[in-house]
Image: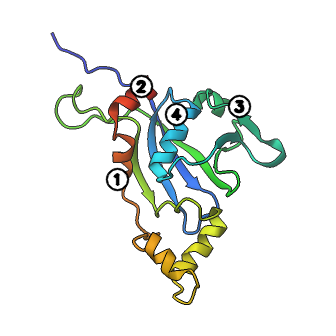
């Protein structure tokens, strides 16, 4: 008798892009097909490196044609509302951290070497990305650009305070392993989150 490996749930491969960032700040994540927008909020916070200090909202489209989506809605339901429009996530409306969410693929998470039941990729997970997440409180994409300029300007009146607080910050560094570790730091939390 041959045992078949357990059937794996489908997963979305998402690319999350911080809108108007230059160079582009982005993450690629795999999330369960059953993910709700509230759960996706947590994934975005951890994958990007935000600190979850502000309110958030999801919407389909922008401007006058936008459709606001409730956090209890499943991602699949939200995507069905706007088949021709993009999904957006706003974190901290005052600063305007707008993220564009692109569905790149619907996948079956890969199995690792060895026993399928043991080596299934844990979801959610981060598989790629670029650039560091801006520090909280830097004022949106345009404030972040000003923050980076000030961090390099030794003549800025707040230079010493900025160096003391953010001296090790490197906008060019993003570590996939660190993002995945944040996503999977408390497996029990995510089993509850995605069950």
Tell which circle, 2 or 1, labels the residue nearer the N-terminal end.
1
Question: Distance from label 2 to label 1 (Cα)?
Answer: 22 Å
Q: Are marks 1 and 4 in contact (CB under 8 Å)?
A: no
Residue nearest the viewer, comparing 10 with 96: 96
Tell which circle, 4 or 2, labels the residue nearer the N-terminal end.
4
Judged from the image, the secondary structure of the residue bearing numbered disc 4 is: helix
Q: Quadrant of residue 36?
A: top right
Question: Distance from label 2 to label 3 (Cα)?
Answer: 27 Å
Question: Distance from label 4 to label 2 (Cα)?
Answer: 10 Å
Quadrant in which the N terminus appears: top left
Tell which circle, 2 or 3, labels the residue nearer the N-terminal end.
3
Residue nearest the viewer, comparing 98 with 53: 53
Residue nearest the viewer, comparing 163 with 20: 163
The picture places residue 67, in percent across and down from the top left corner, at 76, 37
Q: Given this view, does label 4 or label 3 mark the residue nearer the observer?
A: 4
Q: Which residue is mark 3?
A: 81
Q: Which residue is mark 1?
A: 178
Q: Residue furthest top?
A: 1
Question: Distance from label 4 to label 3 (Cα)?
Answer: 19 Å
Q: Given this view, does label 2 or label 3 mark the residue nearer the observer?
A: 2
Q: Which residue is mark 4?
A: 39
Question: Distance from label 1 to label 3 (Cα)?
Answer: 34 Å
Instruction: Give the class, few, some or many, for how many residues have Cα within 10 Å of label 4's Cα (few <14, many ≥20).
Output: many
The picture places residue 103, in percent across and down from the top left corner, at 55, 42
Judged from the image, the secondary structure of the residue bearing numbered disc 2 is: helix
Judged from the image, the secondary structure of the residue bearing numbered disc 1 is: helix
């Amino acid at each position: 008798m041959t045992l078949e490996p357990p059937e794996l749930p489908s997963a979305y491969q998402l690319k999350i892009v911080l809108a108007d960032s230059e160079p582009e700040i982005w993450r690629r994540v795999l999330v369960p097909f059953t993910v709700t927008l509230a759960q996706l909020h947590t994934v975005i916070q951890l994958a990007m490196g935000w600190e979850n200090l502000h309110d958030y909202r999801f919407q389909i489209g922008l401007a006058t044609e936008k459709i606001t989506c409730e956090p209890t809605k499943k991602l699949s339901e939200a995507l069905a509302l706007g088949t021709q429009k993009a999904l957006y996530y706003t974190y901290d409306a005052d600063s305007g951290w707008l993220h564009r969410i692109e569905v790149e693929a619907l996948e079956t998470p890969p199995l690792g070497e060895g026993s399928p039941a043991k080596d299934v990729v844990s979801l959610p997970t981060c598989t790629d990305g670029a650039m560091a997440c801006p520090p909280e409180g830097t004022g949106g994409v345009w404030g972040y650009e000003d923050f980076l300029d000030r961090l390099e300007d030794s003549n800025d009146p707040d230079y010493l305070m900025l160096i003391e607080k953010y001296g090790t910050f490197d906008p060019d560094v993003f570590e996939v392993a660190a993002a995945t570790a944040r996503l999977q730091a408390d497996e029990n939390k995510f089993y509850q989150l995605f069950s």
